[in-house]
Every structure is written in structure tokens, then in C-alpha cells.
Amino acid sequence: MADLKTKYMGLDLASPVIAASSGLTNSVDDIVEFEKNGAGAVVLKSIFEEEIRLYLERDQKAMARNEFIYPETIDFYDDFASDDALTQYLGMISEAKKKASIPVIASINCVSSEKWPSYAQYIQDAGADALELNMFIMPSDFDKTCDEREKMFFDVIEAVLKHINIPLSLKISYYSNNLGPLIQQLTHSGIDGLVLFNRFYSPDIDIDKLKTVSSNVLSQPSEITMPLRWIGIMSDRAGCDLAASTGIHDGAGAIKQFLAGAKAVQVASALYKNGKGHIRTMLREINDWMDQKGYSNLDEFRGMLSTKRTENAAAYYRMQFMKHFAGKNHAV
Ligand SMILES: Cc1cc2nc3c(=O)[nH]c(=O)nc-3n(C[C@H](O)[C@H](O)[C@H](O)COP(=O)(O)O)c2cc1C
């Protein structure tokens, strides 16, 4: 039986497969079920910066009226029954920490460093083991330059780090003019983990109803190549741990990411498709492959095929079809 333990962001994980932030990670029962199925950690469904701002503004108004508001301790979260979504979120974290022993990583979806970062401390006080920031700055904002957009990442990280000392990770998309250097700088910005990459709904058009619609809510296994490329290119250059996300649907997908240098993988779509028990299947597949290859722990092969260590680094960098597919009779 291979040892599947890994260290991610300084956290000791019993396995390298993490339940990614999604609608499947939104309750204490979900977390307990993921633990039973061998998940190394759970990233909670994200709360939104906008929600936090409203919450804090409301509390400031209440404070002006001299009402008691800010919850300070875990005991307070336990005793304070409120319908407020954010109070429930904090309550869920503290409850999960009593019922499960795997790390609970809270998640905040944010696009600015304004007015909300102090809330990160409430998440820490509720008992979260780490915080993941889910940041997506759509490059269709015509009023911002590329530099202005990317500066946001660093502003947010700096602001949040003032309020917490639990590990902090960032999940980004691959939309950047300057992705390699951006990833490198981010991994040296004080964060403990970087998740490559988030994935988004795509637009489609219903030609019968003449309507735009959202499509591709769940990923396909073929989408694994985008994070694989960037984990492979960046794992030797990163100043913090890298986790892979998008298109990891089975044990083989996870193994590829470890070979490229990932510390852990985050999985969502495959769990929607196959249920939470799919994590156990993935772990069995990883274990069987390791037994077959004679590896007893993940570090024995992690990063073995990163750009610096593979004999064929060009596979990570190659973008264009040249002679390989140029023959007239080729099927592609
Ligand atoms: C239905 C659904 C809801 C999601 N909600 C969140 C979220 O709240 N926060 C977040 O950071 N990522 C969210 N994600 C993105 C996933 O965490 C993951 O990064 C992405 O789906 C790529 O992984 P996959 O190919 O395994 O699905 C969601 C994904 C799905 C499919």
C-alpha cells in the first residue's frame, strides 16, 4: 500500500486529492462525507466579496446605533443563531472542525482589495485551516490596462495577509498576457499555494431560440492539458506549492499532475458526474499505479517530468502544428 500523504501549503494532507470549491462543498455533511471518501482536504464553496462588504457595512451601521455585532470567538458562532449567510458560513467552519479532521479551506471570491479583507480574520477565528482566494479579473474590462488588472492580485494578497496567519492560497485563471512571469511573481508574493486554474462557464448560442446561454458547466478530461502545461513549466520556478485544477477526472489525471510537479489536485466536475465516492476510486487508481511502478510515496516521482527534469521539455512549450500534421493524407 503506497503512502499517499502530502504536504500542501504547510498542511499535512492524508491524500493529495482535494474536493475543489463547488456546490458539493457547502455543508458540514459534505465535508464529513468527503473525509470518509479519502479527500485530503475540502475547499468550501466561495463566499463573495460583495456579500462581505454588505455584511460589514450593515454591522458598522449597527455599531453606530450601539448594538452588539462583531462575533469574536468560535463560542460566539456556536451560540449565535442567525440566518445571515456569512454567519452561517463561519458556523459551518467551526462545526466542521468539530466533526471532521481533514483541513477545511475557506474560499472567498474577490476582485478588489477594498473594504472586505478584514473579514478574513473571522474565517481564521472560526477555525479554518487555510483560506483560498478565487480571483478572476475578466480581461474584457476595457478601462484597465493589463498591468492594472494584474496589480489587483498583489493588492489583494497584501491586504489579506495583514489579517491572517493561516496559509493563504490563490486560484487564478489562465487569462494573462504574461502568464509565466505572473505565476512566478505570485508564488513569491507571500501566498502559500497557487491553484492553476479556475474554470468558467462558457457562452453558447441557442440557434432555435435565438438566445445566448451558458454552456460547459462541467469540464471534460481533455481540459487537463492546460493546467498540466503550466504546472510542468512552473513547478521548478515556483516559490510556493502548486495545486492543479481543471479536467482532473481520474487517478491517471492526478498522477500526470504530480509528475509535472503539483503538490495536490483539486477536483469538482468528476465529483458532480460520479459522486463523492469517486475520490476513493481515484486514490485506488493512484495507489495501484504507484505499486506497479514501485513507488512508495508521492515525493519519489513528483516533478519527475517537469520542464527542467523531462528529456522532452519542448512538449510543454510547443504550440504550433508543423510537419507532424502537415502530410496531405493525415486524418487530422
Ligand atoms: C458547479 C460548480 C460550482 C463551482 N463553484 C466554485 C466556487 O464557488 N468557487 C471556486 O473557487 N470555484 C468554483 N468552481 C470551480 C471548481 O472549484 C474548479 O476549479 C473547476 O470546476 C475546475 O475543476 P474541474 O475540472 O474538476 O471541475 C465551481 C465549479 C463547478 C462545476
Image: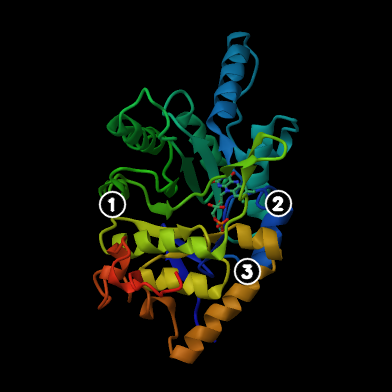
Residue at image point 25% right, 59% down = 237
Can residue 8 be seen? no
**Residue wearing tag 1:** 180
Mark 1: secondary structure? helix
Pointer 2 or 3: first along the chain: 2
- Secondary structure at badge 3 equals helix
Which image quadrant for residue 59? top right
Total number of numbered discs in the rendering: 3
As measured in the structure, the alpha-carbon distance from the residue carrying label 2 to the one carrying label 1 is 37 Å
Q: Which residue is drawn at 55% across and 40% down?
A: 123
The one nearer the camera, 320 or 55, is 320
> Is 290 placed above or below 165 here?
below
Q: Which mark is residue 28?
A: 2
In the picture of the structure, the residue carrying the numbered disc 3 is 279
For disc 3, the neighbor class at 10 Å (few under 14, some 14 to 19, many from 20) is many
The span from disc 2 to disc 3 (Cα, nearest Å) is 18 Å
* Residue sitting at the far top: 65
Residue type pointed to by label 2: Val
Looking at the rendered image, the quarter that the N terminus falls into is: bottom right
Residue 264 in the image: above or below residue 201? below
| Mark 1 CB within 8 Å of ligand 1 | no
**Which of label 2 and label 3 is nearer to you?**
3
Determine crowd level at label 1: few under 14, some 14-19, many 20+ residues with C-alpha closer than 10 A.
some
Residue 48 place in picture, x, y as percent? 57, 33
Quick check: 122 left or right of 312? right
* Res 141 → quadrant: top left
Foreground mark, 2 or 1, reads 1
Query: Which amino acid, by three-letter code, is at mark 3?
Result: Ile
Distance between the Cα atoms at labels 3 and 1?
Answer: 30 Å
